[in-house]
Image (spheres, rainbow, N blue to C red):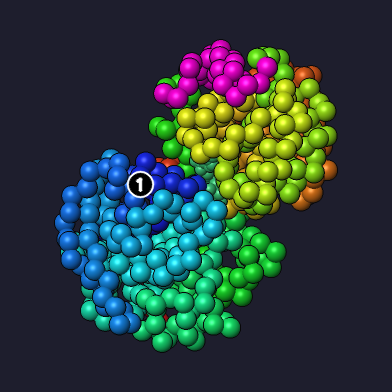
């Protein structure tokens, strides 16, 4: 199949979160299956500065409103997958992808409306009439709409997939502030109080919609888990499915991870002790091998469960534990974490940083990894933790529920600790269960670590499911 993968960020090129991990691993897995996959993304400043690109078109243009948007198409290769970058410096040569670090750019709606249409122009310029256009999240959710409006016949046989990596981000903007969309009068009928919700448009127009885990797909169809899009998801109920993300085991492998000071395998975990020591030394925690080290790496946002963690942080730190949190994001969360870290210098470190090096070392060096998420479409870090024998402590939500097996629930298959109720005390109880297990049952803990390390969620398996989804799309007759 010919697949055009349209996405805002791609690991190794530009990344703010898990979307980028998927946008690298899935196209590579599909390519390995024999599909002709091409990625289209914006050319951000960071990519232009760090990579050598070939210009294949230097004066593509789209006329919209009373403006001509002239852009270049530049290309590079990501492990044999061609990546086409839309070069429109006015919109993409900026220090951040979506924000200046504090505030979202005021023209994000305009930037990504333009990009969603430009992706189709890329397909035409490279003469690639895809079977499937695969869009991802709100940034590219308008592409299925633009495809439907296209009268050139180029996309006549093309079907679209919209993958929802995070339904909380919907791209909801005043339509009158999006110059690029002014010619699209039809969109006014989809706006509410003058606001256009990009994700809703994608849900309405994509041939098929999928969530990044089966359980999240199920949650999106409930009033509580739908991110206020209950009616929109219900209207497409027949076309919504869930496909679990994979874990890129070439990138996340404790047997050869170049970020680690020592390597280890399920048969010999000695290297993990060295990783713990190095991590403790690097962040300034006392180098104690017999104290459980808990870790967390994530975007600092409510989604990741800080509403459950912050109220019990002092309680948790009364125990004989160490805690390390690494992340960037919401200043109110970073301020609160920094204040706690100052009060407990021997037990808790907070690093306000975005660093793959520390993320990898933390996955290897910790004993437990925390993901008490409010919601979690799939979650990748719990899979990375499993691969590194770092037992995840998670809430039973979204993809976390699909990937972590609780000790109490199924002791013989357990790979971590899971709590159900969305409150702090349930989380604290779960943490205490894990700590007790660490101190009281070291041999069983070791067995659980080994089982976790052998768990597999491969991209090959996810890519097979995507192939089936694409095939289902192709048999779909548009109304
Ligand atoms: N400070 C930091 N330093 C270094 N690396 C950092 C970092 N903060 C985050 N990362 C990295 O970013 C990625 C985060 O992936 P997740 O899937 O856990 O969450 P995210 O919410 O971004 O993704 C959304 O999309 C993905 C992909 O579909 C879904 O799994 C998920 O549930 C959904 O919320 C991981 O690779 C992690 O290591």
Name the quarter where the N terminus is drawn.
bottom left
Answer yes or no: disc 1 within 8 Å of ligand 1: no
Q: Which quadrant would residue 350 be assigned to in this image?
A: top right
> How far across and how far down the image is residue 142, in percent?
41, 71
Residue 178 in view here: yes
Q: Which quadrant would residue 458 be assigned to in this image?
A: top left
Q: Which quadrant would residue 256 be assigned to in this image?
A: top left
Note whether 108 is above or below 385 in the view shown: below
Residue 199 in view here: no
Residue visible at 40% across and 44% down in the picture: 11
Note whether 79 is above or below 164 in the view shown: above
> How far across and how far down the image is residue 475, in percent?
36, 69
Q: Is residue 66 left or right of residue 406?
A: left
Name the quarter where the C terminus is drawn.
bottom left
Q: Which residues are magenta?
A: 257-286
Q: How many marks?
A: 1
Residue behind mark 1? 46
> How far across and how far down the image is residue 49, in percent?
30, 44
Instruction: Please check the rendered image and state whether residue 269 is part of the magenta-colored stretch, yes or no.
Output: yes
Q: Residues within 10 Å of mark 1 (few under 14, many from 20)?
A: some
Residue visible at 68% across and 49% down in the picture: 332
Of residue 333 and residue 472, the one placed in the foreground of this image is 333
Note whether 219 is above or below 422 in the view shown: below
Note whether 61 is above or below 398 in the view shown: below
Residue visible at 68% across and 17% down in the picture: 286
Secondary structure of residue under mark 1: helix
Instruction: Please check the rendered image and state whether residue 440 is part of the magenta-colored stretch, yes or no.
Output: no
> How far across and how far down the image is residue 162, in percent?
44, 63
Of residue 474 and residue 292, the one placed in the foreground of this image is 292
């Amino acid at each position: 199949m010919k697949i055009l993968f349209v996405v805002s960020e791609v690991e190794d090129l530009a990344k703010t979160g898990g979307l980028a991990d998927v946008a690298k691993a899935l196209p590579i897995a599909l390519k390995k299956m024999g599909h002709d996959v091409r990625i289209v993304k914006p050319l951000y400043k960071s990519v232009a500065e760090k990579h050598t690109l070939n210009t294949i078109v230097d004066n593509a243009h789209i006329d919209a409103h009373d403006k001509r948007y002239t852009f270049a198409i530049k290309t590079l290769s990501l492990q044999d997958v061609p990546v086409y970058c839309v070069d429109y410096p006015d919109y993409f040569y900026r220090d951040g992808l979506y924000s200046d670090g504090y505030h979202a750019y005021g023209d994000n709606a305009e930037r990504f409306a333009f990009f969603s249409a430009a992706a189709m122009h890329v397909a035409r310029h490279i003469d690639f009439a895809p079977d499937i256009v695969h869009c991802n999240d709100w940034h590219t959710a308008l592409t299925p709409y633009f495809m439907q409006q296209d009268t050139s016949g180029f996309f006549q046989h093309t079907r679209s997939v919209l993958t929802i990596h995070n339904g909380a981000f919907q791209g909801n903007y005043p339509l009158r502030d999006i110059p690029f969309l002014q010619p699209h009068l039809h969109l006014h009928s989809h706006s509410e109080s003058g606001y256009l919700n990009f994700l809703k448009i994608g849900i309405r127009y994509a041939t098929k919609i999928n969530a990044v885990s089966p359980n999240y797909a199920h949650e999106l169809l409930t009033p509580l888990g739908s991110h206020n899009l209950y009616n929109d998801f219900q209207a497409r109920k027949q076309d919504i499915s869930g496909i679990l993300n994979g874990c890129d085991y070439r990138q996340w492998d404790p047997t050869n991870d170049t970020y680690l000071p020592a390597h280890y395998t399920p048969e010999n975990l000695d290297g993990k002790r060295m990783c713990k020591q190095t991590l403790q030394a690097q962040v300034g925690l006392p180098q104690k091998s017999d104290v459980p080290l808990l870790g967390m790496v994530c975007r600092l946002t409510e989604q990741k469960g800080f509403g459950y963690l912050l109220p019990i942080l002092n309680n948790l730190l009364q125990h004989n534990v160490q805690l390390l949190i690494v992340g960037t994001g919401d200043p109110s969360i970073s301020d609160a974490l920094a204040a706690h870290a100052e009060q407990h210098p021997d037990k808790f470190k907070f690093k306000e940083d975005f660093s793959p090096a520390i993320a990898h070392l933390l996955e290897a060096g910790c004993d437990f990894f925390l993901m008490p998420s409010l919601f979690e479409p799939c979650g990748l870090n719990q899979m990375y933790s499993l691969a590194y024998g770092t037992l995840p402590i998670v809430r039973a939500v979204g993809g976390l529920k699909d990937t972590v097996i609780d000790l109490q629930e199924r002791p013989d298959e357990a790979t971590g600790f899971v709590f159900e109720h969305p409150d702090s005390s349930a989380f604290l109880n779960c943490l205490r269960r894990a700590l007790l297990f660490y101190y009281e049952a070291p041999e069983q803990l070791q067995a659980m670590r080994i089982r976790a390390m052998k768990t597999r969620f491969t991209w090959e398996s996810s890519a097979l499911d995507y192939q089936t989804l694409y095939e289902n799309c192709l048999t779909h007759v548009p109304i």
